[in-house]
Amino acid sequence: MKLKNLFLLLLLGLSFCTSPEKKLPEVNPDFKKVLDAHGDWSKWINAKALSFTLFHETNLTQENHFFNLESREGRVDSQNFQIGFDGENVWISPNRESFGGRSVRFYHNLYFYFFSIPYILTDPGVTVEKIENRTLNGQSFETLQASFDAGTGDSPDDQYFLLINPETNRLEWLIYRVTFFNPENKSFNALKYEDYRDAGGLVFPRILTGYTLEGDSTTNIRYQVSFGDVILQDEEFDYEIFQMPNTNAVVAD
C-alpha cells in the first residue's frame, strides 16, 4: 500500500473524544520565555496526537510518523519498513533486517523528540533551567539545560543544552549527549534548527541538520532531515495502528 494512502487511512482511524483543557505545567520564567516564542504551547499540552512527514535529505527517503501524545504510542512508516510502539514493546515489520540502523527502539521516537523540543521538555520528570551562556562557532548564546529524573525515558542520563536565538528567543541549536548505547559516553553532537513554520498555532523547524562537535565548534555534517505535513490533532489515533501485525513482524530492541 502506498504511504500516502496509508496516511489517509490512519487519519480516518481516529478515535473521537473531547476532554477539558489541561492545566499548564509549571516552568521557570526563562524556559517559559522560550516556550512562548514557539507559539501557544497550551496547544501542545492539550493536543492528543501529532503526525508529520520526514524526508532524509542524505538518501532521499521518506517516512510518515504518527504519535499519541499522552501515551506516546508511535508508528513510523517507511518505504522499506514499519516500526511501532504499542506502549510496551517496539516492533518492526516485515523483519529486523529491513531496518539498517543500530537499534529500532532508539530510532522509533528519535525524530519525534528532536522535532518537538522544546515542547517535549514540559513532560513530567524533566527540569529545564538557565545556565551560563555557551559559545558555539564563535557566538555566545543564552543557554538552557534539561535534566531528567531517574526512570524518565529510556536514557535519563542524556544531556541537552538548548542554545537560544537572541532575536527570536527560539531554539537555534541543540547540543546533546546520548547515553542509550553507552552510559559512559562523553561525546556531544550539535543539531541546528532552521526555517520554523507554523502548524496549528505552534512553530516547528522545517530543517534539522546534525553536526559533529569539536570543542565549541561544529565540523562535519552528519545528516539532514526536513519535515512537512505537520498536523496536531484533538483526537488520538486508534490504538490498533500501533499494534504489531500478526504476521511478518517481530519485537525489536
Image: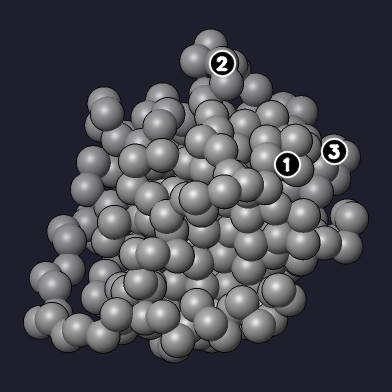
| Residue indicated by mark 1 | 99
Q: Is residue 169 left or right of residue 248?
A: left
Residue 236: image quadrant is bottom left
**Label 1 crowd (10 A; few <14 / some 14-19 / many >=20):** some
The quarter of the picture where residue 8 lies is: bottom right
Question: Is the residue under label 1 in contact with that under label 3 (CB below 8 Å)?
Answer: no
Report x, y in % for residue 65: 57, 65
For label 3, the SS is strand
Q: CA distance from mark 3 to mark 1?
A: 28 Å
Q: For the N terminus, give its image quadrant.
A: bottom right
Which quadrant holds the C terminus?
Answer: top right
**48 sits left or right of 220 in the view:** left
- Residue 187: quadrant of the picture: top right
Label 2: state its secondary structure: loop
Q: Nearer the viewer, mark 1 or mark 2?
A: 1
Taking 124 as reference, is 76 above or below it? below
Is the residue marked by circle 2 packed among few (<14), some (14-19), or many (20+) residues within 10 Å? few
Secondary element under disc 1, as helix, strand or loop, is: loop
Q: Position of residue 149 (x, y in %)?
A: 25, 31
Task: Look at label 1 and name its amino acid.
Answer: Phe
Looking at marks 1 and 2 on the same chain, the residue that comes earlier in the sequence is marked by: 1
Camera-near label (2 vs 3) is 2
Instruction: Tell me which residue sits at (51%, 53%) in the image.
Output: 245
The residue to which callout 3 is attached is 219
Decide which of 210, 246 is in the foreground and name it. 246
Q: Which residue is painted at 56% across and 16% down in the image? A: 182
Q: CA distance from mark 1 to mark 2?
A: 21 Å
